[in-house]
Every structure is written in structure tokens, then in C-alpha cells.
């Protein structure tokens, strides 16, 4: 029997097992990619040549790219050897106990531009080894072993060491490299029994369980919804793109859903996951919560910074707004681009207009003439993986000058200045084109704490022409210090059709008073998206839950159970245990909170937030010595933690052990120089312990990093007045006036400073 004939028989057998009404009403099951090949041969062939197919493989000769011929890699006194023995692949290196041992390669992970290797540890754990194989050609610097963390010395016990929790396949990697992944973490045993129906990323990883579809195909009848799948990829069905009179094609009708991009986003987004149910995952917000354009993850203008993948970038783009979806550019089965080079963009953007020197101002066929090099610049991750920014933006060197964001011009012409790039772009007549990221200036103001940030963010939220991720990101920033106006804005945004905006609005309202939260968030307890129901329930925990009506109480308890289950889904992570600790604490369950925080520290002894929370519980009970002991134990594990040093300093202040306290508070500032609060507290402590000159020095240094910090400005102005530095005080008071022009107390304070300055001039 031929391969395809066998597949046809398999398909018919599967169809016979579940036929008719039974097939369409029973829960769908996974049937493997092999069952798809007989009807979808072309797509299956594409898939066999894709990186999805090779996402995770057995360690056989055809799959292993790295040199396991006794190759040696040395770093920081640790020698790692890659070798074969008995037709198996091994890595000899430092284990979780610090001793050298031989570890068998259980799976090959990834294929290009790098390949990692999974090693097994007790408790069902697979761990990604930290020295990877550079799969690029030797001419590009590849064909070598390299360390994924070249600037860090990682020892056993460090979360980033290959044996640590941050290199754990079961939690960190597995969902996006296999099909029907079920993590199956047992918190009581601290062990995994992880399963998958298919080793790599197969058809059903995107389409969902196919048993209903196979049953229908085996006995064709009027097709069920989505031909038996839980989700249908029909965004492009019946759609055409018309060139019309312009140089850019337009969609024949507006998009009616974002279903395809959200399915891709399950893996191609920076997001939190709280379920591995495949049906929930297909609905995205029932299993995931994507991040917004947060500072540190993205630049203020939305360019990728940290490892954020593609979804958040693409949501900002004009392409997304116009109705373009992932498979318009990418063949979803091969993973390859549909066309090469500028021809891909030329599907919609007329080459007669855009693929010309009059547009790109570079020599034909040069790197500068390639659309992607100007509009999709790369950032390198994992040492060798150059990923293009999918926000598809206009280069803005003027923003480089104003807010230190990257730009494509200087990425190639790195020997030139941003001013040179600005002049060049202006000379082409392109300087007046702002691009789609009109939120950049508002986000830069907010991230700098500058005057006018609140008003600028509010305008972004209210502007429906902005992308949903821009509006959600503006709300996220407003949630840091909500005002009456902000709460009103967020209340209005709760009715937005996009879950990302509603989620960000709920986060703003979580900082409101109990009555406001009840009024605004109770309807969200019945939101169609689980992520939103969880967010609303968590925000209502505590005082706001006390006076709920019976119907609201039932919805609240149901949504709260979803929230708790979502945290327990990641019970192996200290972050989730800390979330549970805060949750129990808000409900007055002190012992449950303590247990959750202790579990977090058992999982990661260096996890500072849990130690600080445990110390706070001890402090609240009047046991300051226990608080100090907790913090000192954690500092021994994490000696470079500014937050731990700061918390210890505060504990010592409360115990009136001021010399020790000052040392610890000063250490916190040195370890976390970007934390304005630490510098403010240390400066005040210096002043109050008889070192006013040092206090002004500390606060002045902090102000250079945080030029609009309210507390630092107010305190430094006061100390300068005390010292007779009226000119310095007046200058800082003027800056303070820009921050809170309507605050009566601040206005009186500034008036007093101005009056003193005027008297000094006389």
C-alpha cells in the first residue's frame, strides 16, 4: 500500500469512528498531521519543509546540526564538551549541583539561525542548554558553539543557568514548539507530566483538533461551521485588493475580525498564558493576555526593544489597520514569504511608484533599495537571530534626536549622526510624513514623567484612529497614577469592542475607590473574554466585594475562580505564587498569603518580591526582627537586588539602627540608580541624619535621571531654600509648576519660593 493510500484509509477509518451528528457534538480530538495529507497534499508538503515541522525533533543525525565530535566550549572556568556515545548525543557540563556530569540530549530544539538542545532533569523537566549552535553559514559567522548569555557568569542556582527555572522547556518553550501541549504541572510533587499529541508544530497547532473535520471529510455532507473546526481562517475569503486610482491597493471591504492574527499571536506575541486548553487558545483572550507597548519592552515610538515577537508591532501598523493579515505576506504552511524581495510589497504598493529611486533614494538593487531595510529594520535577539520589526514604519531620525529611539537610516549608516539622517530625509521631501505611530511623543512624555503627559495620553485614548494597542498602551501608562479624569476616561473605554483596550481600562479602574470599581467593573465579570473576567474579579477583591448584590456575587465568585485557576496554571512560577499571595492578602487570608510567598521563594530563592512581601507580613504583625531576617536571607541569595537592600534599610530605620540603615539605603541607590523612589528616600534620610549637603547631592543626581519627579523636585527645592540656595530653589520650583499647575498646595509652595527669591534679589 502506498503512503497516500494508507493515509486515505486512515482518514476514512477516523471518519467512520465519529460520523454524523455524533461527530459534530462530541468534544473534538487531535488526529495528527498525517491525517491531513491525503486531502491537503500541497499544504502538507509545504509544512514538511517548514521550521514549524522542525521546531522540535528527536536527536537523530538528520536533525542535529551542531558538532558533537568532542568539540569543547569554555567560559568562566566551566568546560563543556559535545560528544556522541553509543549513537546518542551528550553534553558534558556543570549540572544543578555544580558538579560536572554527562547529560543525554533528549530533543533538538529549533533549526535556524540557531539550534538548542534539551536535556532532562528530575521531575519531568526538560531544560534548554545555554550554549547553542549557530546554524548560519560560516561566511556569516556561523557554524560554531556560542553562549546565549556572553556577558553573564551563570552558576547553578541562577534562574538563567541551564538548570534554572528560566530555562525550563515545560513552562517557557513547550507550547510554541509542539502540538496539543498539556503542561500537567503537579504543584504538590513539584513535577511535570507534560504531554503532546505531536512533537513539532503540526496542522492542529493552528487549526485546532481536527476529528470533526476528518469525520465530515470521510462522509461528506453539508459542511458544519468552519468545516468542523472550532475556528475558521476565513479573513481572506472573498477579499480582493484593488489598485484603483492610488499607488496603494485597498481592501474590497473592511476586516470583520482579527481571528487569524490572534491565532498566530498565541506564539508570536509577548503574552502571559493562563490555560493550555486548545479551544480556549483558539479564542486567544481565553488563554492569553498580551502585553501592551510597555516601557522597557518597546521604545516610546513602538519599535521593538526587548524580545516581543511580532503581534504587538503588527497591531500598530497601517497594514493591520488596512485589513492586511499574516497570510497575506506569509505562506502559513511553509512559513516562507509569498514572494521574494520588493515583489512582496509590490502586491499592494505599486512598483512603478515605490520601487523607484525617486522613492527610496538609493541605487537600484542595493540594500538601501529594499523596502524592508527602511520600513522593517532588524533587532538581533539570542545573539544571532535578526528579527524584523513588523510595525512597518516610516524612518524617523528626528525622533532619534528627540527621544533616542532607533531609526533605519542610522542602522545602516551607523557612522553618521541622526542630524545627518534628518537632513537627508528632509532633502527628499519626506520630512513631513509622520507615519502611523502618532503616539510616540505622548509615550515619551509619560515615560519621562514630563509635564503634559496625562493630557497627551488621554488624547491617544480618545482618538479612534489610533491602533488598539496604542490606545491600550496609553491607558496602561495612565493606570500608574489615576486621576478623576483618568477614571472617567477608563470607564468609557470599558465598552470598547477590542478586549485589549477593555483590559487596559480595567487596570486603570483597579486603582479606584470601592464604589467606583463596583459600578464600572461588575459588567466586566460577564465579559466574553476570560482575561477580562479575571481582571475585573481581581480588581474587585477586598473592600469592593463586600456589598455585591446576589447576581453580581455569583458572577464575581465564578470569575474569581477563573483568576485563581489561571494563577495555579503557572504554579511553578514565583510570579504566580506572589500574585496568589497578594490575592489572599487582599482577602485577609494572612496564612494563605504567607504560604504562597514561601512557595515562591522555594521555587526561586532569589525572587525579591516574595521576600519583601513576607517581610511586610512580619512587620505588620509587629515582628520587625523576623522581617529583617527574611530580607537578609534573600539578600544572601540575591546580593545585587536594589529592592531588597531598600526594604532592609527601611526595616533598620524602624529599628532605629541608623548607621546600618544608611548603608543599606545607599546600597539600594547604587544597585538601582534608575529607581527614583530609592534615591528620594535615601536623600531624605541623609538630610534627617545631619548630612544636608550629601542629601542635596543625592537628590540632584537623581533629578538628572528623573527631571520631573514630583517628590524629588519638592524636597530638593525645600532643602535648597534651607541652605540659602535661592536661585537653585527658584529654578526647581519653576519646573515643579509645570507638573501640577492646578494643585493649590503646590501653587502656594511655589509662590513662597518665588517670594523668597524676589526678596533675595532686592
Image (tube, helix red, strand yellow):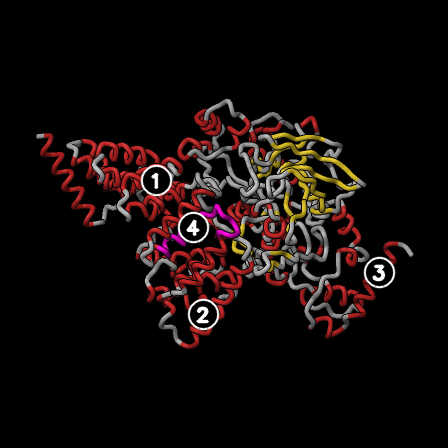
Q: Is residue 377 above or below residue 231?
A: above
Q: Give the label, 3 or 2, closer to the camera.
A: 2
- x and y, in percent, of residue 216 in the image: 76, 67
Q: Nearer the viewer, residue 124 or 46?
A: 124
Q: Distance between the Cα atoms at labels 1 and 2?
A: 43 Å
**Which circle's residue, 2 or 4, is located before the other in the chain?**
2
Q: Distance between the Cα atoms at labels 3 and 1?
A: 71 Å
Q: Residues within 10 Å of mark 3 (few under 14, many from 20)?
A: some
Q: Secondary structure at mark 3?
A: helix
Q: Secondary structure at mark 2?
A: helix
Q: Which mark is residue 8?
A: 3
Q: Give the label, 1 or 2, closer to the camera.
A: 1
Q: Nearer the viewer, residue 123 or 505?
A: 123
- x and y, in percent, of residue 560 in the image: 47, 66
**Residue ID for mark 4:** 611
Which residues fall within the magenta stretch? 601-618
Q: Nearer the viewer, residue 241 or 434?
A: 434
- x and y, in percent, of residue 635 in the image: 43, 43
Does residue 345 appear left or right of residue 730 in this picture? right
In this view of the protein, can residue 625 be seen by the observer?
yes
Q: Which mark is residue 556?
A: 2
Q: Quadrant of residue 731?
A: top left
In the rendered structure, are the residues bearing label 1 and label 4 in contact, judged by CB atoms less than 8 Å apart?
A: no
**Residue ID for mark 1:** 664
Residue 349 drawn in magenta: no
Q: Distance between the Cα atoms at labels 1 and 4?
A: 16 Å
Q: Quadrant of residue 234?
A: bottom right
Amino acid at each position: 500500500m502506498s503512503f497516500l493510500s494508507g493515509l486515505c484509509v486512515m482518514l476514512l477509518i477516523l471518519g467512520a469512528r465519529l460520523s454524523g451528528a455524533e461527530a459534530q457534538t462530541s468534544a473534538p480530538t487531535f488526529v495528527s498531521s498525517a491525517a491531513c495529507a491525503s486531502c491537503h497534499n500541497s499544504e502538507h508538503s509545504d509544512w514538511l519543509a517548514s521550521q514549524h515541522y522542525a521546531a522540535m525533533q528527536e536527536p537523530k543525525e538528520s536533525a542535529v546540526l551542531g558538532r558533537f565530535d568532542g568539540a569543547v566550549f569554555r567560559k568562566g572556568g566551566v568546560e563543556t564538551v559535545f560528544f556522541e556515545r553509543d549513537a546518542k548525543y551528550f553534553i558534558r557540563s556543570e549540572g544543578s549541583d555544580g558538579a560536572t556530569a554527562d547529560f543525554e540530549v533528549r530533543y533538538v530544539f529549533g533549526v535556524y539561525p540557531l539550534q538548542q538542545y534539551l536535556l532532562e532533569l528530575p521531575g519531568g523537566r526538560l531544560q534548554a542548554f545555554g550554549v547553542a549552535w549557530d546554524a548560519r553559514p560560516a561566511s556569516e559567522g556561523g557554524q560554531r558553539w556560542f553562549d546565549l548569555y556572553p556577558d553573564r557568569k551563570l552558576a547553578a542556582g541562577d534562574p538563567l543557568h541551564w538548570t534554572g527555572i528560566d530555562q525550563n522547556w515545560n513552562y517557557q518553550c513547550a507550547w510554541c514548539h509542539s502540538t496539543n501541549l498539556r503542561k500537567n504541572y503537579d504543584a504538590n510533587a513539584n513535577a511535570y507530566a507534560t504531554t503532546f499529541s505531536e512533537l513539532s508544530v503540526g496542522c492542529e497547532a493552528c487549526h485546532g483538533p481536527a476529528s470533526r473535520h476528518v469525520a465530515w471529510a470521510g462522509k461528506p455532507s453539508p459542511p458544519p461551521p468552519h468545516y468542523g473546526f472550532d475556528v475558521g481562517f476565513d479573513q481572506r475569503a472573498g477579499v480582493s485588493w484593488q489598485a484603483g486610482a492610488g499607488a496603494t491597493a485597498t481592501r474590497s471591504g473592511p476586516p470583520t475580525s482579527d481571528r487569524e492574527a490572534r491565532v498566530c499571536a498565541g506564539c508570536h506575541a509577548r503574552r502571559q498564558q493562563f490555560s493550555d486548553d486548545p479551544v480556549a487558545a483558539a479564542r486567544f483572550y481565553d488563554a492569553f493576555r498580551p502585553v501592551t507597548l510597555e516601557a522597557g519592552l518597546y521604545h516610546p515610538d513602538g519599535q521593538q526593544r526587548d524580545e516581543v515577537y511580532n503581534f504587538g508591532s503588527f497591531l500598530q501598523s497601517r497594514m493591520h489597520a488596512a485589513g492586511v493579515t499574516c497570510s497575506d505576506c506569509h505562506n502559513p504552511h511553509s512559513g516562507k514569504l509569498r514572494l521574494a524581495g520588493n515583489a512582496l510589497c509590490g502586491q499592494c504598493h505599486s512598483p512603478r511608484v515605490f520601487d523607484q529611486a525617486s522613492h527610496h533614494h538609493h541605487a537600484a538593487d542595493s540594500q538601501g533599495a529594499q523596502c524592508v531595510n527602511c520600513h522593517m529594520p532588524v533587532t538581533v535577539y539570542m545573539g544571532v537571530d535578526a528579527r524584523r520589526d513588523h510595525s512597518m514604519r516610516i524612518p524617523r531620525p528626528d525622533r532619534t534626536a528627540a527621544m533616542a529611539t532607533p531609526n533605519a537610516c542610522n542602522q545602516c549608516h551607523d557612522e553618521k549622526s541622526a542630524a545627518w539622517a534628518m537632513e537627508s530625509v528632509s532633502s527628499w521631501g519626506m520630512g513631513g510624513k509622520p507615519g502611523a505611530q502618532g503616539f510616540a511623543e505622548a509615550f515619551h512624555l509619560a515615560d519621562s514623567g514630563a509635564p503634559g503627559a496625562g493630557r497627551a495620553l488621554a488624547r491617544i485614548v480618545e482618538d479612534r484612529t489610533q491602533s488598539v494597542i496604542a490606545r491600550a498602551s496609553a491607558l496602561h501608562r495612565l493606570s500608574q497614577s489615576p486621576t478623576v479624569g483618568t477614571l472617567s476616561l477608563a470607564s468609557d473605554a470599558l465598552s470598547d469592542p477590542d478586549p485589549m483596550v477593555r483590559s487596559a481600562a480595567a487596570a486603570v479602574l483597579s486603582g479606584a475607590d470601592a464604589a467606583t470599581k463596583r459600578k464600572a467593573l461588575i459588567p466586566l465579570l460577564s465579559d466574553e473574554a476570560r482575561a477580562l473576567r479575571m481582571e475585573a474579579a481581581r480588581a474587585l477583591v477586598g473592600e469592593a466585594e463586600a456589598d455585591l448584590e446576589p447576581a453580581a456575587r455569583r458572577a464575581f465568585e465564578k470569575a474569581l475562580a477563573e483568576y485563581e485557576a489561571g494563577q495555579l496554571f503557572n504554579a511553578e512560577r514565583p510570579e504566580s505564587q506572589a500574585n496568589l499571595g497578594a490575592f489572599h492578602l487582599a482577602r485577609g487570608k494572612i496564612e494563605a498569603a504567607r504560604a504562597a510567598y514561601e512557595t515562591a521563594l522555594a521555587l526561586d530563592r532569589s525572587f525579591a518580591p516574595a521576600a519583601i512581601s513576607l517581610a511586610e507580613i512580619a512587620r505588620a504583625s509587629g515582628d520587625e526582627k523576623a522581617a529583617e531576617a527574611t530580607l537578609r536571607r534573600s539578600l544572601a541569595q540575591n546580593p545585587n537586588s536594589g529592592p531588597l537592600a531598600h526594604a532592609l534599610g527601611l526595616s533598620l530605620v524602624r529599628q532605629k539602627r541608623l548607621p546600618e540603615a544608611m548603608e543599606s539605603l545607599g546600597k539600594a541607590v547604587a544597585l538601582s540608580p534608575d529607581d527614583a523612589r530609592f534615591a528620594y528616600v535615601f536623600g531624605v534620610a541623609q538630610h534627617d541624619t545631619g548630612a544636608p549637603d550629601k542629601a542635596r547631592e543625592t537628590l540632584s543626581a537623581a533629578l538628572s535621571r528623573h527631571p520631573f519627579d514630583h517628590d524629588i523636585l519638592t524636597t530638593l527645592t525645600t532643602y535648597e531654600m534651607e541652605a540659602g540656595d535661592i536661585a537653585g530653589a527658584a529654578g526647581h520650583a519653576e519646573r515643579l509648576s509645570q507638573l501640577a499647575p492646578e494643585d493649590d498646595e503646590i501653587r502656594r509652595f511655589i509662590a513662597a519660593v518665588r517670594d523668597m527669591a524676589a526678596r533675595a534679589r532686592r
